[in-house]
Amino acid sequence: MRVGLTGGIASGKSTVSELLAELGAVIVDSDKIAREVVEPGTPGLAAVVEEFGPSVLTEAGSLDRAKVGEIVFADESARARLNAIVHPLVGARSAELEEAGRVAGKLVVNDIPLLVEVGYAPFFDEVIVVDVPVETQIERAIARGMTEIDARARIAAQASREERLAVATYVIDNTGTLEDLHKRVREIYDSLA
């Protein structure tokens, strides 16, 4: 069984991912893998620099994620070009980790923030969506240090709440208490494991 986990920015998806890991799931985290495939010295970083120029590098030679974010969240075609470089690399590494988890007999959960945006929902037997209202996302993103303008731009660049909910087989409403969240995650884990 293939399980996907997604949610918009500041929805609490990372917390859900951590809770699932604590329960024994193997988490294949696309964000972590996306950082890994563009580390210094990788073909992924070389391809990003070739596409966007050396201004996307820090002085130390690593990817300046904030600079790249400014570029791609303001320009849909730039985002598509970045995704065309990074997504295949992430997909290949994810497949390796997913297979290792399956061989170990564990529930494997693919944590993919852009699962809906890249059209991956049909490739999963079950899709868990962490859901909160847009205003909650904005409040949480601002609390993390993002400006309201940046938060709204990121939200606008992602699938809508309705698009995510349309592919969900499990929905986690993350507007309650941490205890509520733990309980719901446990219910889902127990039904999938």
Image: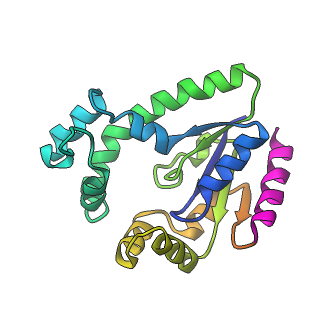
Q: Image check: 79 left or right of 185? A: left
In-front residue for pair 128/189? 189
Q: Quadrant of the N terminus?
A: top right
Q: Measured along the vertical axis of the image, is residue 27 above or below residue 182?
A: above
Determine the image quadrant of residue 135.
Answer: bottom right
Image point (42%, 71%), residue name: 151
Q: Main secondary structure of the magenta part?
A: helix
User: What span is in magenta?
Assistant: 177-193
Q: Measured along the vertical axis of the image, is residue 75 above or below residue 36?
A: below
Q: Measured along the vertical axis of the image, is residue 85 above or below residue 172?
A: above
Determine the image quadrant of residue 60.
Answer: top left
Image point (76%, 70%), residue name: 177
Q: Position of residue 153 (x, y in %)?
A: 37, 71
In-front residue for pair 17/165? 17
Q: Position of residue 17 (x, y in %)?
A: 65, 48
Determine the image quadrant of residue 156.
Answer: bottom left
| Residue 182 belongs to magenta span | yes
Q: Position of residue 154 (x, y in %)?
A: 40, 66
Q: Position of residue 65 (x, y in %)?
A: 31, 51
| Residue 180 belongs to magenta span | yes
